[in-house]
Image: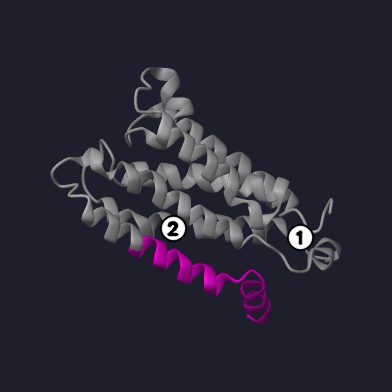
Amino acid sequence: MTGLLLYARSRALPATLAALAATAAFAVWAAGRLDAYVDPDRRVPVVAMAPLLASAVIGASLYTPSDELDRTAVHRWWPRRLTQLAGLTALAAVLVTPAVLGHAETFGPPAVLRNTLGCTGLTAAAAVLLGARLSWLPAFGYVTAVYLGSNTARGRAATIWAWPMQPGAAPGAWATAVTAFVLGASLYAARGARPEDAGG
C-alpha cells in the first residue's frame, strides 16, 4: 500500500481528484444557467468545454518529478501509467455526465463520454511530445477552433474532423474520439510524459 500511496502523491493525484470534482461542479452549474431544458442544443458549450477542462486536469497529473528514477526502475511502468490514465478518464466522464443528463441522442451523456475520451487521448499524446505541463495546449487549440468554426459544417467528413461538436450518436465522431484515446493512451503508457527539461 505504501508504494501506491507514494505513486499517488508523486503524481499529485489527490489534487487532481479535487480539480476534477471542481470541474464537474462548474459544468453542472454552467449547464443549469443555459436553460438546456428548453433546447438541448444549448448544452454544446458544456459538452465541448467540460471534457476539455477535465482532460487538462488529467494531463497535469501525467507529470513525473523523477523521470530518471522511473526509467531505471526494475518494475514496468506502463501498467501504472495506463491504469492512472484510464481511471482518471473514467472518473472524469462519470463526474461531468450529470451536467447533461437526458437527451442522449443529441447533446447528452454519450457526447460527454465521447469528448472526454477524445480530449484525454489528445492530451496524453501531447504529454509524450510536449511534456505534461503543456499537454493541455493542443486539445485546447483544436477544440476551441472547432467550436468557433464548425457552425456550418455538415456531412460525413464533419463528423470526423468536428467530432467534439457532434451529437452523441454520430458514428464518425465516436470512431475519431476512440481512436484518439487508444493512440494517446498507448503512446503515454509506452513512453511516459516527456521530461520537462528535455531539449531545454
Q: Is residue 82 left or right of residue 19?
A: right
Q: Residue at x 53, y 48 (%)?
A: 120
Residue 63 position, x and y percent, is: 68, 62
Res. 193 image quadrant:
bottom right
The front one of 121 and 182 is 121
Q: Residue at x 34, y 49 (%)?
A: 46
Magenta segment boundaries in residue numbering: 1-25
Residue 186 position, x and y percent, is: 65, 45
The amino acid at mark 1 is Arg
Question: Where, quadrant-wise, is the N terminus in this rendering?
Answer: bottom right
Res. 147 image quadrant:
top left
Real-space CA distance between mark 2 and mark 1, rounded to the nearest whole angstrom? 26 Å
Question: Where, quadrant-wise, is the C terminus in this rendering?
Answer: bottom right
The front one of 46 and 169 is 46
Mark 2 vs mark 1: in front: 2
Q: Is residue 95 above or below residue 150?
A: below
Mark 1, residues whose alpha carbon is within 10 Å: few (<14), some, or many (≥20)?
few
Q: Is residue 145 magenta?
A: no
Residue 108 position, x and y percent, is: 28, 44
Q: Which residue is mark 1?
A: 76
Q: Is residue 156 left or right of residue 185?
A: left
Q: Which residue is mark 2?
A: 92
Mark 1: which secondary structure? loop
Q: Is residue 10 magenta?
A: yes
Q: Residue furthest left?
A: 38
Mark 2, residues whose alpha carbon is within 10 Å: few (<14), some, or many (≥20)?
many
